[in-house]
Amino acid sequence: MRVIGVAGWSGAGKTTLIRRVLPVLIRRGLRVSTIKHAHHGFDVDQPGKDSWVHREAGATEVLVASAARFALMHELRDEPEPALPDLLARLMPVDLVIVEGFKRDSHPKIEVRRQSVGKPPLYPDDPAIVAVASDVKLAGLLIPVLPIDDAAAIATTMADAAAVI
């Protein structure tokens, strides 16, 4: 599958950017999925629900299905965190996968940079960054710098820069 990442420090607006770009890509006829890396433990289940009871009782995987959607939860227990290629293999085929996070992986990425975050830039230290989406003008970069609010330009860059991994 073709993959493009969105990387940046917490608070830079990665999720907001993805939310704005997804409809643009879909209107262009692309089928798009996303993978979001969470740094901390998280739970998509609700205590007391049957699926939660199954997982808490020791099930390795719990699949919840309805007429509207299904969700597969895999409890890692003592297994190592899966690598991005392993997670990609679990997705059904689509035209493009947008990966939020996995900032240290080598897939092509667009850096989201906001001046107010006050963190150091990821580019040029990360050679996988193919463009920067920023809320301020940046000069002297050897890669495209896109206005953070220009969803159309960012969508085009994402589609063009995505790579098969």
Image: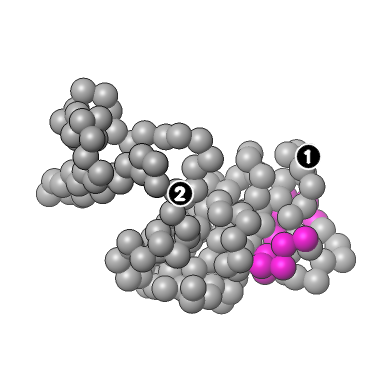
Left or right of 157? Residue 118 is: right
Q: Judge left or right: residue 157 versus residue 22.
A: right
Q: Quadrant of the N terminus?
A: bottom left
Instruction: Report whether residue 27 is seen.
Output: no
Residue type at mark 1 is Gly
Categorize mark 2 by other alpha carbons within 10 Å: few (<14), some (14-19), many (20+): few
User: Which residue is pictured at 49% across the width and 73% down the height?
Assistant: 165
Tell me the amino acid under the disc marked 2. Glu
Q: Which numbered tag is attached to residue 81?
A: 2
Q: How is the image coloured?
A: one colour
Residue found 73% across the figure and 39% down from its top? 117
Let me know if residue 58 is in the magenta part: no
Residue numbers of the magenta segment = 125-137
Residue furthest to the front: 78
Instruction: Say which label, 2 or 1, has the lower sequence index.
Output: 2
Q: Residue at 52% of width from left, 53% of height from top?
A: 100
Regarding residue 137, the answer to whether it shows in the image is yes
Residue pointed to by mark 1: 118
Q: Secondary structure at mark 1?
A: loop
| Camera-side mark, 2 or 1 | 2
Please state the horizontal and vertical placement of residue 105, each as a whole percent of the image: 59, 61
Q: How many marks?
A: 2
In reply to whether residue 130 is colored magenta, the answer given is yes
